[in-house]
């Protein structure tokens, strides 16, 4: 195989961006051979914009069974991510799943179990923020261990502003039955994945969620979560889609320093001695360990979605590592499910939680979900650029 023949399932906003990038030769080891979408308007779009060499299907099943693809990229709304990933793997196709891995961990575990039966297939997750030089450097320092254990983490990620029109642009958006959650399920899968990738998984989660606080929606658009790690370290995670001048500041306090990512810059506060050591040996009542702050240099690379797809193709063709294995998708989802569960039950959730309980609680919300009728999907006009990048 010289190139991976890829089929994209779902050519809405994101799927059509991926298609556009591939057709614009940004993924040299991938050939787009098919797309599928169950909205006839999107098939019309594809017929107009994509060459004849790209087959168009009205169902994911037809694409998967077409024999035209070695791999699929699943870019439909969240509930169906595991459905089509499983279907494709069972047909012997490599799979890349858009974030989040799914809506609830029970279905994602089922997907992971099928993937385990197909170790020959590459199973990747579209965690494009892992390609960002800032977060890669942060992980290197935190996981490197030179600066000691984590004491505290704080991430305020409130620059995901979305106006009401965004929520009105698709009938699945911001509904329990169509999307399965709000900012935690749509925008924050990136940060929750990065959080666990850089800091590891906490053991306890307690959260306050507000549903439809800033928008006319039924799911959460405002979250404040508190987490605890096995070593006693704590974490606070704050997010919303309601702040028009939001922030993105992620800091990790280590025993011998502090790393801060903010405004696409990375600062490191390095102490001469570790704080626990200093506190034990210092005799001056208001003493404080000396240190310095530097802006860290990185390799500056940030290939985002194309970087993930190129690594996926390379994993299939050359056996290299993907950016994120599909199996890893469950970690961030576990955090967001735990945050929902904590709010719904009004208590701290210990990980791993009872996934059957989560499923039942979610289904209660699904049963009373206000599915939006007569909403016409609005997809960005990508006609000039074949999608371009974000
Ligand atoms: N990685 C990122 O940066 C990023 C950015 C945006 C969206 N996403 C993810 O991409 C996915 C899609 O989001 P979007 O904004 O493109 O949504 P969208 O509504 O614009 O597109 C989804 C498309 O899937 C089609 N579809 C729905 N159900 C289908 C089915 N059963 N079979 C075939 N087609 C079906 C719809 O008709 C639509 O065209 C979501 O999981 C979202 O979280 C990822």
Image (spheres, rainbow, N blue to C red):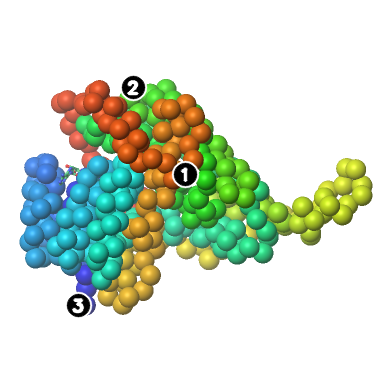
Q: Is label 1 within 8 A of ligand 1 (CB to nearest ligand atom)?
A: no
Pick the residue in front: 51 or 59: 59
SS at badge 1: loop
Identify the disc placed on residue 351: 1
- Whole-Å distance between the Cαs marked 1 and 3? 42 Å
Residue 387, position in %: x, y? 26, 52
Pick the residue in front: 194 or 137: 194
Q: Earlier in the sequence, mark 2 or mark 3?
A: 3
Q: Is residue 291 visible?
A: no
Residue 72 image-quadrant placement? bottom left
Compared with 103, 318 (above or below) is below
Residue 119 image-quadrant placement? bottom left
Q: Residue at x 20, y 49 (%)?
A: 83
Residue 342 image-quadrant placement? top left
Pick the residue in front: 87 or 183: 87
Residue 24, position in %: x, y? 25, 62
- Give the image quadrant in which the ligand numbered 1 is located: top left
Q: Is label 3 within 8 A of ligand 1 (CB to nearest ligand atom)?
A: no
Sort mark 3 into few (<14), some (14-19) or many (20+) by Cα contacts within 10 Å.
few
Compared with 232, 163 (above or below) is above
Q: Is residue 159 left or right of residue 173?
A: right
Q: Nearer the viewer, mark 1 or mark 3?
A: 1
Q: According to the image, label 3 marks what residue?
A: 1
Q: Residue at x 27, y 75 (%)?
A: 317
Q: Is label 2 within 8 A of ligand 1 (CB to nearest ligand atom)?
A: no
Q: Earlier in the sequence, mark 1 or mark 3?
A: 3
Q: According to the image, label 2 marks what residue?
A: 216
């Amino acid at each position: 195989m010289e190139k991976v023949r890829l089929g994209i399932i779902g050519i809405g906003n994101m799927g059509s961006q991926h298609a556009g990038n591939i057709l614009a030769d940004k993924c040299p080891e991938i050939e787009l051979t098919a797309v599928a979408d169950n909205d006839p308007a999107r098939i019309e779009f594809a017929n107009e914009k994509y060459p004849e060499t790209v087959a168009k299907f009205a169902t994911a099943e037809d694409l998967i069974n077409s024999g035209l693809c070695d791999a699929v990229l699943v870019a439909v709304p969240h509930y169906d991510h595991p459905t089509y990933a499983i279907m494709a793997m069972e047909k012997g196709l490599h799979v890349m799943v858009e974030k989040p891995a799914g809506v609830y961990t029970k279905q994602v575990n089922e997907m992971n179990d099928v993937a385990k039966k197909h170790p020959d297939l590459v199973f990747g997750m579209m965690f494009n923020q892992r390609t960002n030089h800032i977060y890669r450097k942060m992980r290197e320092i935190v996981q490197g261990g030179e600066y000691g254990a984590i004491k505290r983490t704080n991430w305020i990620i409130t620059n995901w502003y979305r106006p009401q029109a965004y929520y009105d642009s698709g009938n699945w958006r911001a509904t329990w039955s169509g999307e399965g959650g709000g900012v935690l399920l749509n925008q924050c899968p990136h940060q929750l994945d990065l959080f666990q990738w850089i800091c590891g998984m906490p053991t306890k989660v307690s959260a306050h969620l507000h549903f439809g606080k800033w928008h006319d929606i039924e799911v959460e658009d405002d979250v404040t979560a508190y987490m605890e790690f096995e070593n006693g370290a704590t974490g606070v995670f704050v997010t919303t889609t309601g702040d028009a001048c939001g922030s993105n500041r992620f800091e990790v306090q280590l025993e011998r320093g502090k790393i801060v990512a903010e405004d696409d810059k990375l600062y490191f506060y390095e102490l001469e001695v570790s704080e626990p050591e200093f506190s034990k040996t210092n005799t001056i009542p208001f003493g404080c360990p000396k240190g310095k702050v530097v802006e860290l240099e990185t390799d500056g690379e940030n290939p985002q979605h194309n970087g993930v797809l190129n690594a996926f193709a390379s994993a299939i063709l050359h056996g290299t590592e993907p950016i994120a294995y599909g199996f890893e998708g469950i970690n961030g989802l576990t955090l967001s499910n735990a945050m929902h569960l904590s709010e719904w039950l009004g208590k701290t959730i210990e990980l791993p939680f009872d996934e059957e309980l989560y499923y039942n609680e979610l289904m209660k919300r699904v049963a009373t979900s206000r599915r939006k009728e007569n909403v016409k999907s609005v997809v960005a006009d990508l006609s000039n650029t074949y999608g371009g990048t974000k």
